[in-house]
Amino acid sequence: MKKVFLGLCGLAFAALLSGCCMKHQWVEATCTEAKHCEICAKTEGSPLGHKWKEATCTTPEICELCGKVRKEAPGHQWVDRTMEKPKTCSVCGETEGSPITCTELVLHKINPRDYDSQMFSVDTMAFFNLEEGVIRIFDYEENELASIDLNPNHREGRTYDYTSVWSEQNNNMMIFTTDLDEDKNCTICIYNQRGELLGKFTEKVDVPDGQILQMRRTVDERYARFYASGASGLHGVTPTLCIDYVDMVVADVNAGSETKWYNAKKFSRVIQMPYCDNKYNLAISTDGTKVLYVHSKYYSVQAEYADASRFNMSGLALVSEKGGTYDLVDTDLNIIAKGLLDAKYADWGGAYIFTLWQKDGSLKFYKIQ
Ligand SMILES: [Zn+2]
Ligand SMILES: [Zn+2]
Ligand SMILES: [Zn+2]
């Protein structure tokens, strides 16, 4: 009897399997698998295939059906902000932040004709008059802070000189003055941006008759190199005197390596941009008539200007194609402001401030934000 029962069950199972009365267990099609039966693996139709949704800057290329990722989100293609536009993605147009704005900080009216040159610091402005032998320093309320007499001994003929430099060390202006007497003793004074005396030296120097001693260049943010006024082509030329203006001592004349300038000797001067990416520098042509925008390693010329002033720490420079008006450019030479009049850069540390010296004598200070 048991045998008969088992035999019947076997028949029933066989009947089920043959499909006469048992249903397939269908599994719906997916991207990669066709609709199929879980039990007998019979298929119907074909796989759906992935339904790819294109990637955007911030979302990956993804299958809408199964969520499979084919390509990660590429990220935005940012284009730096300009005066017109904020930082903008060139692909999707997404923006971040705001356009560069120039906030007018201070407006002064002064008479530029009274001075040969001027330099602006964070809190002072210095006006240099070589003929009268005076440097006058004011704060921005126009109070005179200091008056430096370049010819204190009232010697006949010009025996004095001045040079003003921006010092990254102090993040401010430094002024070097020289005054040579009949016995070739030179008095050198070093002042800060407020006209305060930082160091004073009297040194016997070797300067040909009829020439004066000039501070012509600083090296390594530390050494001020003094040359006779007749000296030209200063690369490799030993200075007459060298002062370490960090320790305020007279230094060896060879102090401050010149070797790094070797590649650059086809230019009379290369203005290094210590706080930028250092990819490009400004260089002055040997005849002094052109400012070149050069690759800092290969010294290949990228662009040529009639005039230019150094980058500030944010990588901006003022350049002039023909002289007269200036464009503000970033380190890739994109013009972000055009037609500035006779502008001077004030490298006020990270404050990105420049001044706009206009022909009518108005002096504007801007903060780039
Ligand atoms: Zn089946
Ligand atoms: Zn899929
Ligand atoms: Zn984007």
Image: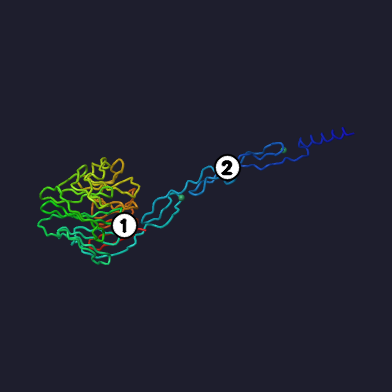
Q: Position of residue 362 (x, y in %)?
A: 25, 63
Residue type at numbered disc 1: Trp
Sequence-wise, which precedes: disc 1 or disc 2?
A: 2
* 118, above or below 29, in the image: below
Of circles 1 and 2, the one toward us is: 1
Which residue position is annotated with label 2? 50
The yes-or-no answer for disc 2 within 8 Å of ligand 2 is: yes
> Which amino acid is tagged 2?
His
Residue 301 occupies quadrant: top left
Q: Which of 123 and 368 is in front in this view?
A: 123
Q: How far apart are marks 1 and 2 (CA)?
A: 57 Å
Q: Is mark 1 on a helix, strand or loop?
A: loop
Using a 10 Å C-alpha cutoff, classify the residue at mark 1 as few (fewer than 14 neighbours), some (14 to 19) or many (20 or more).
Answer: many
Q: Foreground residue, 318 or 71?
A: 318
Q: What label sits on residue 348 in the rendered view?
A: 1
Tell me if 69 is positioned left or right of 356 in this view. Answer: right
Residue 114 found in image quarter: bottom left
Nearer to the camera, 184 or 316:
184
- Indicate the position of residue 317 as horizontal and vertical percent values: 30, 52
Q: Where is residue 64 in the image (x, y as percent from the top left)?
A: 57, 46
